[in-house]
Amino acid sequence: MEKGKHQEGGGGGGGGAVVVSKLMPPQNPIEQLQSRYKELEGGFKAWLSKQSLPVEAAVVTATSAAQGAAIGAFMGTLTNDVSSLTPPPPANLNPQAMASLKQAQALSGGPLIQARNFAVMTGVNAGISCVMKRLRGKEDVQSSMVAAFGSGAMFTLVSGMGGPNQAANAVTSGLFFALVQGGLFKLGQKFSKPPEEDIYYARTRNMLTSLGLQNYEKNFKKGLLTDGTLPLLTDSALRDVKIPPGPRLLILDHIQRDPELKSAKKK
């Protein structure tokens, strides 16, 4: 009899679990994909941060170049290939006109040409930014302008826009890219200035930005994890605000390595 009761109880428990599972709303597949992507991204960044500078710079350059190539190929399909539509220039064409023609061909080439140009531009920019950030320990307008100068100069050399005096034109293009990037960086800082109530998350924001995890700032705000709670953070607290495992490891490791936060935790 007792055995039968146990069996009935077990069956009842299983039926209750089925009922509860039916009552629970199904998880949004888009949210599942986003969560999975964030986990993979966090894990990749965690692995990349442990690599040497040459390895990190090479990986960042390659991935950014691949993205730039895809964008360039798409842009190239929207423009006509001037080199195929334009008849060959006459032999007596003056050098200045020939340089202008080459510049037009470089800017309106087909998918392969634009893929090459954008790959070089984005890859060099990302690679230099990575090196500057690792060496200087921060990402500011100076680092951004140096990266833009390098990408502008290389874009000019590779795309053939340099004309007869390639070195001078490469420097000019690099300076132009650097000035534009510096202006955009300052403009972005001005318009992205946090509201006054965000002063309680200033240190948190700096930490997340240095780790490349600034997208999770909203998670800290939702959980009211202010700067004062940083020394007290645990894996379970970060998990409660829906931060994936990879970023959690990076955050906790950063807190353990920060002397000020470590000493505050001991107090």
Image: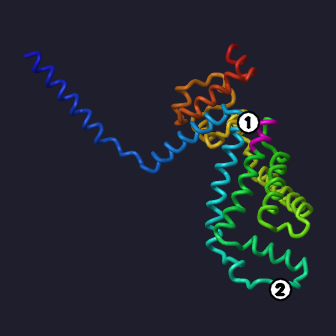
Q: Residue furthest left?
A: 1
Disc 2 residue type? Pro
Q: Amino acid at mark 1?
A: Leu
Most common SS among magenta residues: helix
User: Residue 53 shows which numbered tag?
Assistant: 1
Residue 207, by quadrant, is: top right
Element under disc 1:
helix
- Colour logic: rainbow
Residue 20, compared with residue 255, is above or below; it is: below
**Residue at (63%, 30%) from the top-left corner?**
251
Q: Position of residue 115 (x, y in %)?
A: 66, 63
Which of these two is toward me, 223 or 2?
A: 2
Query: Mark 2: which secondary structure?
Result: loop
Alpha-carbon neighbours of circle 1 within 10 Å: few (<14), some, or many (≥20)? Answer: some
| 207 within the magenta span | no
Image position of 23 (left or right of 229) = left
Between 244 and 90, which is closer to the camera in this rendering?
Answer: 90
Q: Disc 2 versus disc 1: distance between alpha carbons?
A: 50 Å
Image coordinates of residue 71 in percent, x first then y, are 64, 62
What residue range appears in magenta?
130-136
Q: Earlier in the sequence, mark 2 or mark 1?
A: 1
**Residue farthest to the front, as pictured:** 91
Q: Which mark, residue 90?
A: 2
Q: Nearer the viewer, mark 2 or mark 1?
A: 2
Residue pictured at 67% horizontal, 51% vertical = 64
